[in-house]
């Protein structure tokens, strides 16, 4: 729903990532139908892909490239942005001074921040974020929470899976059961 943050929660193995991948069109649903703007998503696949941003468990960055080069690559085919705008996005995720360092020389948290910089330049109205807080320190978590709230306030929709104790006013929750703990 536009203007909302929805948290998908549940134990390991309960299907959080699978649900997000189905929503993103990366996995097929076993039953039912997904609608995009009132129409079956299968009929609007290209439009849906242009209006959705998916960040999964893996950062999707290339470790041989620098953060700036990675952000250029992530934005390819979207909307053209100047290097100054991309540098500001990297600085906004705490990577000022690291934009020209090969990502292989960055920590896991810094590599995650490279991928998260994509959010600062994103104009897609739907964000699907899988375990977005992985390897992020306390200051980074707070910045991401603010970013999610800002996106919702601007009319965007955010669906996020996390084990982090995410608490936002007006946040929706989807709680999945099952998982690894229920199989014992």
Image (cartoon, rainbow, N blue to C red):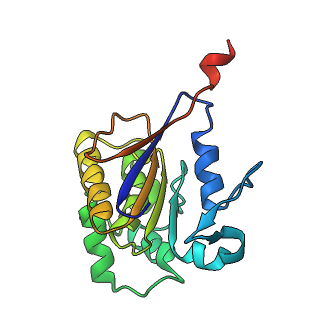
Residue 29, x across and y down, in percent? 73, 52
Q: Is residue 97 visible?
A: no
Q: Relative to 97, is 59 above or below?
A: above
Residue occupying image coordinates x 38% and y 66%? 156
Q: Is residue 14 visible?
A: yes
Q: Give percent across and percent down for residue 101.
A: 37, 64
Residue shown at 43%/71% (left/top)?
71
Relative to the observer, which residue lies in front, 119 or 30? 30
Q: Position of residue 98 (x, y in %)?
A: 30, 63
Q: Is residue 53 left or right of residue 90?
A: right
The answer to which image quadrant residue 83 occupies is bottom left
Residue in the picture at 49% in, 72% down: 74
Q: State the image coordinates of residue 69 (x, y, percent, origin top left).
A: 44, 74
Looking at the image, is 114 positioned above or below residue 100? Answer: above
| Relative horizontal placement of residue 148, taking residue 126 as reference (left or right) | left
In which quadrant will I find the C terminus?
top right
Quadrant of the rendered structure where residue 116 is?
Answer: bottom left
Which quarter shows the N terminus? bottom left
């Amino acid at each position: 729903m536009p203007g909302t943050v929805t948290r998908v929660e549940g134990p390991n193995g309960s299907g959080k990532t699978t649900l997000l991948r189905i929503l993103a069109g990366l996995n097929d649903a076993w039953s039912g139908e997904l609608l995009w703007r009132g129409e079956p998503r299968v009929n609007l696949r290209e439009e849906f892909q242009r209006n959705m941003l998916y960040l999964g468990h893996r950062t999707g960055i290339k470790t041989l490239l620098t953060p700036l080069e990675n952000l250029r690559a992530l934005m390819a085919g979207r909307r053209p942005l100047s290097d100054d705008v991309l540098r500001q996005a990297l600085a906004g995720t705490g990577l000022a001074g690291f934009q020209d360092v090969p990502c292989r020389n960055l920590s896991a948290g810094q590599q995650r921040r490279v991928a998260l910089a994509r959010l600062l330049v994103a104009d897609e109205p739907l964000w699907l974020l899988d375990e977005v807080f992985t390897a992020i320190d306390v200051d980074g978590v707070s910045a991401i929470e603010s970013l999610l709230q800002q996106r919702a306030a601007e009319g965007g929709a955010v669906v996020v899976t996390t084990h982090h104790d995410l608490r936002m006013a007006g946040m929706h929750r989807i709680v999945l059961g099952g998982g690894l703990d229920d199989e014992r």
